[in-house]
Image (cartoon, grey):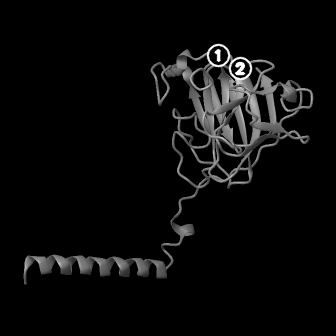
Amino acid sequence: MSVKKIVIWVVVLLAVFSIGFYLGLNFFGFLDRNILKKPVPIGELTPAPTGEGWIDLLSPDRRKHWKNATDDSDIFEITDEGVLHIYGKSLYPLRYVAYTAESFSDFQLHLEFRLTPRANSGVFVRSQLNDPVNRGFEIQVLEDYGKPPNKNSCGAIYDITTPMYNMSFPAGQWNSYDITVKDSEVIVYMNGWMVIHTFLDKMTTPLGKFPIPYSQLSKDGYIMLQDHGGEVWYRNIRVKKL
């Protein structure tokens, strides 16, 4: 038998064996996704905080302070129910909806967001109006339900720090963030689970795509929401200064 025929027979036998092995496992249920899939945390929406010190940034008297910080394009609305809706009709340039009445240094922030399939946005904190991306940092907002976490996942400090878990709910469901920023410490809870706990002062060299080390970022800036061309809704945006 020629070498060519031997190779062909080996390939055929391997293919038959692989198919048989697959069918055998599937017959016994071993390939069922519910069996093979590793358990992951199941979160729940955290309630909007109330009480002393908490400021509702979407209250009727504060809605006027939300502005498109990038240009004069009409990119969002705030409904009578107090929901900030980013239309997501344009992708470039990326635009930012900023709460312009005041800046924040050390604070706790609660907000809830809802995304359409494949939508992308972001919560920017301590950002500067003239350079939100490089003079502030982003907690990623992304429709990525069920995917493994990475440094660009929902809940990440974008392109810098990977969340411990992907806590995203499916598209169309509300998610909650509870973010604490104090000096250089950043803690992010998503749907009730802590996914990020880090210290920016340890980041003394540039990381990810950003030219400025995070240890050099200003400790005071604005809260902004990114228009990345995807439709997204935000509600219950509450902040408490520390």
Residue occupied by mark 2: 106
The count of marks equals 2
> Separation of disc 2 and disc 1 at Cα?
8 Å
Q: Nearer the viewer, residue 146 or 8?
A: 8
In the rendering, at what x and y percent does residue 119 appear?
64, 47
Work out whether 116 lies above or below 16. Answer: above
Residue pictured at 92% horizontal, 31% vertical:
60
Residue pictured at 71% horizontal, 39% vertical:
177
Work out whether 43 lies above or below 185. Answer: below
Rate crowding at label 1 as few (under 14), some (14 to 19) or many (20 or more) other CA atoms within 10 Å. Answer: some
Residue extending furthest toward the left: 2
In the rendering, at what x and y percent does residue 238 appear?
81, 31
Disc 1 is placed on an element classified as: loop
Which mark lies nearer to you, 2 or 1?
1
Whichever of callouts 2 and 1 sits on the residue coming sooner in the sequence is: 2
Image marks 2 and 1: residues in contact by CB distance under 8 Å = yes
In the rendering, at what x and y percent does residue 147 appear?
55, 53
Three-letter code, disc 2? Asp
Q: Nearer the viewer, residue 114 or 94?
A: 94
Determine whether, in the image, residue 19 is placed left or right of residue 215: left
Q: Quadrant of the N terminus?
A: bottom left
Determine whether, in the image, residue 56 is placed left or right of residue 179: right
In the rendering, at what x and y percent does residue 193 appear?
67, 43
Residue occupied by mark 1: 219
Disc 2 is placed on an element classified as: loop
